[in-house]
Image (cartoon, rainbow, N blue to C red):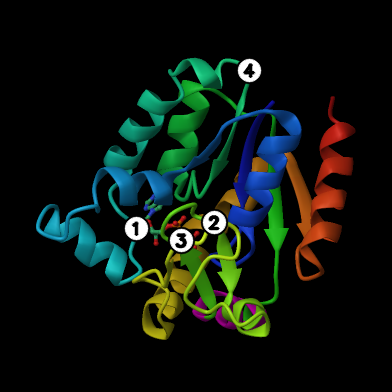
Amino acid sequence: MKLVLLGAPGSGKGTQAARICEEFSIPHISTGAMLREQHLNNPEHNKELHERVAHGELVPDELINEMVSERIREADCKNGFLFDGYPRTNAQAVYLDSLCPVDAVVRLEVPMDLIMDRICGRRVCSECGENYHISALTAIGSEDTCPKCGGRITTRKDDNPDTVKRRLEVYAEQTQPLVGYYAAQGKLIEVAADGRPEDITREIFKLLRELT
Ligand code: ADP
């Protein structure tokens, strides 16, 4: 199964992606995570890229497309994959179609007012990468330590209100039009994503099983 998960920053893509990939045994390909691992791991390198990401702008299509084309050539992508955060522009969608057309695009729809709270409250474990909302960590008295693995809890640098505002504008301008692009291909699966994560997961599984 070759899938794309489409949704604004804070729509819950990361959480749902992990669950979909486990259920359908496909690799989770997050271009944001790849970018942080491969190009943004040293603050002294790639200063321009750091700047763009820190300001909520996208990085160049060519860089992302190249990372993706290398990644899907790896053996674990043989039976499918799920893209999280890719494609994000029309040029990326056209490139992906030329590389390997996907079977379906799951779109997570969330009201904008929820998104600000979700992202600004987002915390990430520096060890296992698990995402949390600060309120959940506070509730169990574990604001600094990952309840799953004991790793240190961090906040992503681009999860601050100004950058989030710009990321949402960029999403509306450049990524939202892909909804129409994939609807025209008959590949769009729309899911309301403002409920409980487990209910959203159940709905996604149900819709994806209808495909197979
Ligand atoms: P989110 O979905 O919450 O915005 P990501 O981890 O997917 O977070 O992306 C973080 C940043 O990485 C983006 O704001 C952007 O600058 C860059 N990025 C990630 N994927 C892409 C992409 N496909 N095209 C261009 N830039 C990207």
Q: Which mark is residue 113?
A: none
Q: Amino acid at mark 3?
A: Gly
> What is the C-alpha distance between the residues marked 4 and 2?
30 Å
Q: How many marks?
A: 4
Determine whether label 3 and label 2 are within 8 Å by CB.
yes
Amino acid bearing label 1: Leu
Q: Position of residue 144 (x, y in %)?
A: 47, 76
Identify the residue position indicated by label 4 in the image.
79
In the orientation shown, which residue stands out farthest toward the front?
Answer: 150
Determine the secondary structure under disc 2.
loop
* Mark 3 or 4: the one toward you: 3
Question: What mark, if any, has residue 58 been given in the picture?
Answer: 1
- Looking at the image, the residue that sits furthest to the left is 44
- Quick one: 27 or 128, which is closer to the camera? 128
Q: Mark 1 packing: few (<14 Cα in 10 Å), some, or many (20+)?
A: some
**Is the residue marked by circle 2 packed among few (<14), some (14-19), or many (20+) residues within 10 Å?**
few
The boundaries of the magenta stretch are 113-120
Q: Residue at x 42, y 74 (%)?
A: 159
State the CA–CA distance, disc 3 to disc 4.
Answer: 32 Å
**Label 4 CA crowd tier, 10 Å (few <14, some 14–19, many 20+):** few
Q: Earlier in the sequence, mark 1 or mark 2?
A: 1
Kind of element beneath mark 1: loop
Q: Position of residue 27 (x, y in %)?
A: 57, 31
Q: Is residue 118 above or below residue 193?
A: below
Q: CA distance from mark 4 to mark 1?
A: 29 Å
Q: Which residue is mark 3?
A: 151
Q: From the top left corner, tell me how far across and down residue 163 is, in percent.
A: 37, 77
Left or right: where 46 falls relative to 67: left
The answer to whether the residue bearing label 1 lies less than 8 angstroms from the nearest atom of ligand 1 is: yes
Q: Which residue is mark 2?
A: 149
